[in-house]
Amino acid sequence: MKKVLRIGANVIAWIVLIFALLITIIVFSSGRNNGVANLFGFIPMTVESDSMKPTFSKNDLIICKEIDDLNALKEGDVITFWTVIDGRRVKNTHRIVSVNADEGARSFITRGDNNPADDTLPAYASDIIAKWTDVKIAGVGKFMNFLRTKKGFFICILIPMAIFFLFELYKFIVTLIEVKRPEPAEQLDEEEIKRRAIEEYLASKGETADKTIEKKAENLEDAKKEAFEKFEEVKKEAAEKAAETAEAIEEKAGDLVGKAEEITKETAEKISESAKKTDD
């Protein structure tokens, strides 16, 4: 989407520039040629009256062309020529209604399509400017007249051209910034370096963790071994104490048995003596 917008902006900018250049050429050309702008042989003219209506009307823009051969002009052609109206020398665009050829000098009787009578003065060969090409653009002539003024030239030509050059300057700066940016391959290299650094870091952390686990396992085995040894020692001590206790009990039991035997013997002797006394 951004690419499409960028292309569209470029196209519009170039159209504006080309239009501005064309208008500039027309304006300066008309200024040097008594108000007749010549653009590669084509002459844009603004219609000043409705004398040719309905062929074209006031404020229409018509495109005329320089005449290579005046002898090729004929009745029915629409020409632009210099004439005098109300004491002023002005441009006029009317249709040829007849051709005069007196002693090799050609002149043309003209009339506006909307006029009831022929023009007062004929158009001589030296007065003819151009021939109409049958091309007209309705209403644009007024705009062209506005462009020929200082205000119109500033608003419609200078400002758009300034905007165009500012836009191109912006594009140039953006291009410089993009050129200074690292290439995608370089960015990939940087990303690869970062990735490898992270992997190495994590690997080192993993090795440390593995060593810690191994160390803890070894410590656990040592603790288990030590606990077993202590258990064996306690068991041995308990067995020894149990043996000693059994011997003490056995000795005491022997003593009690001996005493019981003595008491039994003494009792038996006493019973025997008592029995003898009773017999006597």
Image (cartoon, helix red, strand yellow):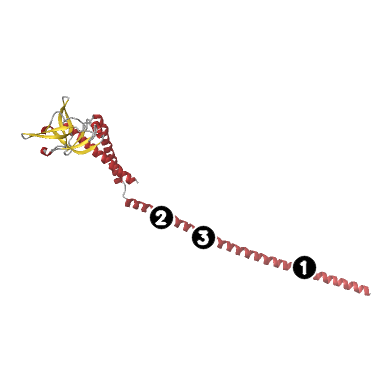
Q: CA distance from mark 2 to mark 1?
A: 83 Å
Instruction: List x then y, in percent, for residue 221.
Output: 53, 62
Residue 215 left/right relative to 136: right
Q: Nearer the viewer, residue 79 or 88?
A: 79
| Mark 1 Cα shell of 10 Å, populated few (<14), some (14-19), many (≥20) | few
Q: Taking the image as drawn, is residue 266 in sight?
A: yes
Mark 1 lies on a secondary structure that is helix
Q: Which mark is residue 256?
A: 1
Q: CA distance from mark 3 to mark 2?
A: 26 Å
Callout 3: few (<14), some (14-19), or many (20+) C-alpha neighbours within 10 Å?
few
- Frontmost of labels 1 and 3 is 3
- Would you identify the image quadrant in which residue 206 lies? bottom left
User: Percent from the top left, x then y, of residue 264?
Assistant: 82, 71
- Mark 3 in CB contact with mark 2 (< 8 angstroms): no
Left or right of 156? Residue 257 is right
**179 left or right, relative to 65:** right
The three-letter code of the residue at mark 2 reads Glu
Q: Which mark is residue 217?
A: 3
Return the residue at label 2. 199
Q: Residue at x 27, y 36 (%)?
A: 160
Q: Which mark lies nearer to you, 3 or 2?
A: 2
